[in-house]
Image (cartoon, grey):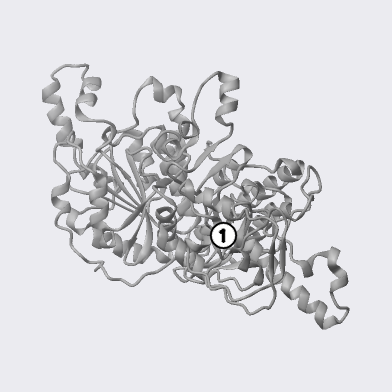
Amino acid sequence: MAQPLQRFATNIGVRNAAAATLCRSTAIRSLGTLSCKTTTTIRLNNHHRSIHSTNINYNDSSSIIDDDDDTTTTTKHHILHNDPTNSHLISNDPSTIKRHFRTRLTSTKQTSLLGGGHARIAKQHARGSLTARERIDLLFDDQSFRELDALVTHRCQDFGMQEDESTIIPGDGVVVGHGLIHGRRVYCFAQDFTVYGGSLGESHAKKIGKVMDMALRVGAPVIGLNDSGGARIQEGTDSLAGYADIFQRNVDASGVIPQISVVMGPCAGGAVYSPAMTDFIFMVDDTSYMFVTGPEVVKTVTNETVTKEELGGASVHAGGKSGVAHGSYPNDVATLRAMRTLLDYLPSSNDASTLPVRPVTDDPNRSVPSLDQLVPDDPNMPYDMKDIVREVLDHGSMFEIQPEHAKNIVTAFGRMEGRTVGIVGNNPVVLAGCLDIGASEKAARFVRFCDCFNIPIVTFVDVPGFLPGTGQEHGGVIRHGAKLLFAYAEATVPKITVISRKAYGGAYDVMSSKHLRGDANYAWPGAEIAVMGAKGAVEIIFRGKDVEKHTAEYTDRFANPMVAAQRGYIDDVIKPHDTRRIICDDLRLLRSKKVYTIPRKHSNIPL
């Protein structure tokens, strides 16, 4: 952690006399060596705001007067020549006035860089988290981030919010702007928990809205780094209005530009609904949590005793329980690094020309002999579908979405011939690859994202059907399963399907079958395409008579892809080792695909 913090401190070099008072600050010395060459006249009252910097060099001539030796308190500083009560000390000469303004402007900008001050920054570090600016420094390419609205302050005058300078902090608790990630433009807002607990007020919300509007206008992704205690209570309905304004922008941007939420601290109450409407949510283990009502309210209403982590931590939302988040990582650094990787797969907008294309360094015609051995002939023997996916993708590299949730289906981004593809695959190693409520929702959401942003979908099928049981039926598996069916049927991007082994019943139809306008559908020689397994079918057809004999007949007839091939329901029966070559060839052909849809306001997916 030390290295990125040092890089951050070096990058924000502050050059103002006010910072000289902090030469003795332990917090600053821990980040670098200060070089203070000044004797600026600065009077500090009982509390002062320190400036976060390294290598401070300036040549003003004055002296420092400190009324309080408490260097841990961080509220405000008072510069004599900027104090309106000392206006008689300032000349009426225009050049002098402008010079003083430039000094005040520099001082204000430096104050905004520090956020809530060193004491609060130390608390943020103590809980294992970086500050908003440190996170931005790690997320973006070096020195590419341009901050906007650094001087914005709140306008609230109630409950002591205009009491003195300590309650009016430039930036208002959120850092916004844009920069480059892998050389591509990305917009970002990062809430600063050291300022008012990152709480959202009117000005705070307007800053976020501004960067979202700009991202939408130019067609660039937007990333939100959430670390907020919620609405700023002192601002009342202005805070609620600010949330609603952001929600509306989330909806307006949906399907137009990628939206990514990274929850890196608290995110509670109404604040959770903005991340919930974005395309992806990621969390940090142990330090982030999301919930609508906190443990205290839960205790009061239901008499349940629960911790924040148990109620809405990363282990809940990204660990397979709720499915709200799409992944989690051990710390801020790992999380931000993962976001850079994810963005490298995504287009900048729904304009197909913005899809990233990487140099082809893995032969698209590469044969994959290992695929001939990966799938057992015994239909009851499990195997990991991820092994097949990695063999087919460029260099075996993929970015999995929701890896800990609904593990019976795999959703991931990868590349084939240097271009991004979306991967969906039943995973027989979990629940035999059955579709259930969780798997259907997980895959449906992923398919719709890919369709929004022109990402081709490659589907690997090994599914014995929908998971039976009262839990599934009572939980609405019919409605949830229909979401995946609807998503595949509605998708107009290139759709390529490979049946590696089983494709039974309605699940065969759902998994991007030819009947849902699949562009290319293939089966491996060991595939079985039927209404159900041979034994179950025979017991129903022949009512339990001569089961073994009729099972052999049924298996010979349907436990292979021949009938489906004869009907044209699959385009070919291919050898497994040719799979990569054939898919790459089809993707190349389908780049010019055009689909004409029926005019309508919008579809009505069974939510």
Q: Tag 1: residue type? A: Cys
Asked if one can make out residue 287 in the rendered structure from this viewpoint, the answer is: yes
Residue sitting at 14 percent across and 51 percent down?
372
Q: Where in the figure is residue 483, as x and y percent of width and height?
A: 47, 38
Dividing the picture into quadrants, the one containing residue 103 is bottom right
| Residue at 43% from the left image edge and 62% from the top image edge | 4
Pick the residue in front: 99 or 485. Answer: 99
Q: Eyeballing the image, is 16 above or below 163?
A: below
Q: Residues within 10 Å of mark 1 (few under 14, many from 20)?
A: many
- Which part of the image, by quadrant, shows the N terminus? bottom left
The residue to which callout 1 is attached is 188
Residue 543 position in % (x across, y down): 22, 16
Would residue 428 be found to the left or right of residue 93 on screen? left
Q: Is residue 250 left or right of residue 100?
A: left
Say whether residue 279 is visible.
no
Question: Which residue occupies the foreground of this view, 489 or 259?
Answer: 259
Rendered location of residue 365, percent (x, y): 22, 66
Q: Is residue 87 above or below residue 167?
A: below
- At x 62% / y 67%, what residue is drawn? 19
Residue 65 picture location, percent across and down? 70, 64
